[in-house]
Image (cartoon, rainbow, N blue to C red):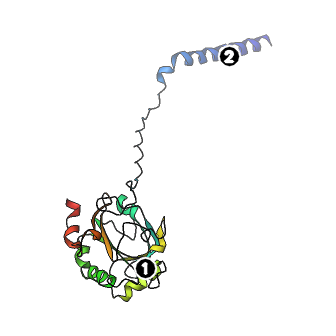
Amino acid sequence: MKLLTSILALFLVSCVALDDSCVSGCDDDILEPDVIEEEPLPPEPEPCLYPTATGRLLYSETFPEVSWEGAYDAEGNQVTIHLLDQYCGAEEGSVISDYDSIVLAIGTGWCTYCPDYMRYIDSIADELEANNVMVIFVQLQTATMATATSDFAHEYINDLGITSGFRVGDANTWPLPEFFLNSNDIIAYPTGFIIRTRDMRIIANQRDSNYYLDFRSITAGISED
């Protein structure tokens, strides 16, 4: 029995010695894991904010940020138009492209000279398209002076034989319905604006001219100036 106890004690001592030797002598043999330094994440892009606008519709002013849900394109498809997208850039896959400028042609259903104005802009649609211009026909009122919806605008513009541009009604202007109708800066119909999309500035206003604006020349080369 004593012999067995002695053997067991000797075995335990040798194990402790073995463990001690590993603790003191094996550290150099242990491979440290490679430390991978992670690349810092790129900073989040600054959100695109529409330029500050006073709400005035005058030459050199920033055109206000407006939108139209349920607008129509020339083929009769309903689309949503956000001027913010034209300033910041349309999202990938958007049905509406990025344009260098916007022509707003504004009229009413009771205006005598509005049809000729709208038809004139339609007659130069190919040249405006070549200048990367977005044409929006805006109707403010019906023939009975009710506020025009985009449904009315689409039907009215089609009845004029116009085959280009987008069509919107002031009843559907966001964030303020009847925004154009209530503007003190629109003093006669028809009227129009040319807006440069890189800064949303009004670069031509029909109220400043007794003749049709030279839409073709004004919108030519905007992306290069």
Tell me the quarter of the picture where residue 117 sits. Answer: bottom left
* Amino acid type of the residue that numbered disc 1 sits on in the rendered structure: Asn
One can see residue 61 in this view: yes
* Residue 212 screen position, x and y as percent: 24, 76
Classify mark 1: residues with Cα within 10 Å, few (<14), some (14-19) or many (20+): few
**Residue at image x 44%, y 66%?**
67
Q: For mark 1, what is the residue?
A: 77
Q: Nearer the viewer, residue 5 or 110?
A: 110
Element on which disc 1 rests: loop
Which numbered mark, 1 or 2, is in the foreground of this view?
1
* Residue 149 screen position, x and y as percent: 47, 78
* Residue 75 screen position, x and y as percent: 38, 82
Query: Residue at the right extreme?
Result: 1
Q: Quadrant of the N terminus?
A: top right
**Residue at image x 29%, y 66%?**
101
Mark identifier at residue 11 = 2
One can see residue 91 in this view: no
